[in-house]
Image (tube, rainbow, N blue to C red):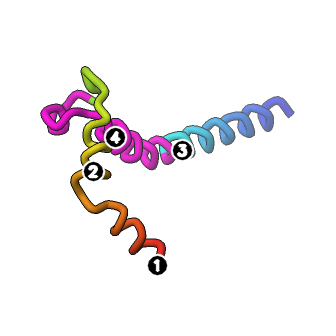
Amino acid sequence: MHSDDRSTLLQKLLTFSVLALILALVLIPYTYVIVTAFKSPGEVFETRWIPQEFSVQAWIDVFRINEFHYYLWNSFL
């Protein structure tokens, strides 16, 4: 019985590891997009993941300069 318990535990550990790897591969691009949305324009192309200063200027520009509300409305239609 002890050998069966060990193989079951090993199988669960392997399954969990594979699922954790898949989850990381799926979430990393989303995390990068969200973090980049709060970077200043000068920091966007830097290799550092975490910005030195969080900026909401890009969000302000999207709603103020562009006609984003028209594009959003078009998506709902």
Q: Nearer the viewer, mark 2 or mark 4?
A: 2
- Mark 1 and mark 3: Cα distance apart in space: 40 Å
Q: Position of residue 44 (x, y in %)?
A: 19, 38
Camera-side mark, 3 or 4: 4
- Residues at marks 2 and 4 touching, judged by CB atoms closer than 8 Å: no
Which of discs 2 and 3 lies nearer the camera? The answer is: 2
Magenta span? 22-48
- Amino acid type of disc 4? Tyr
Residue at numbered disc 4: 32
The earlier-in-sequence mark between 4 and 1 is: 4
Position in image of residue 23 (x %, y %):
51, 45
Residue wearing tag 1: 77
Please state which amino acid type lies under the numbered disc 3.
Val
Image quarter where the N terminus lies is top right
Label 1 vs 3, first from the N-terminus: 3
The disc labelled 2 sits on which kind of residue?
Arg
Mark 1 vs mark 2, foreground winner is 2
Q: Residue 18 carries which label?
A: 3
Label 4 element class: helix
Q: Distance from label 4 to label 1 (Cα)? A: 30 Å
Q: In the rendered structure, which amino acid carries the disc numbered 1?
A: Leu
Q: Earlier in the sequence, mark 3 or mark 4?
A: 3
Of the numbered discs 2 and 4, the one sitting upstream in the chain is 4
SS class, disc 3:
helix
Residue depicted at 79% across the width and 34% down the height: 5
- Farthest residue, direction top: 52
Residue where numbered disc 2 is placed: 64
CA–CA distance in space, label 2 to label 4: 24 Å
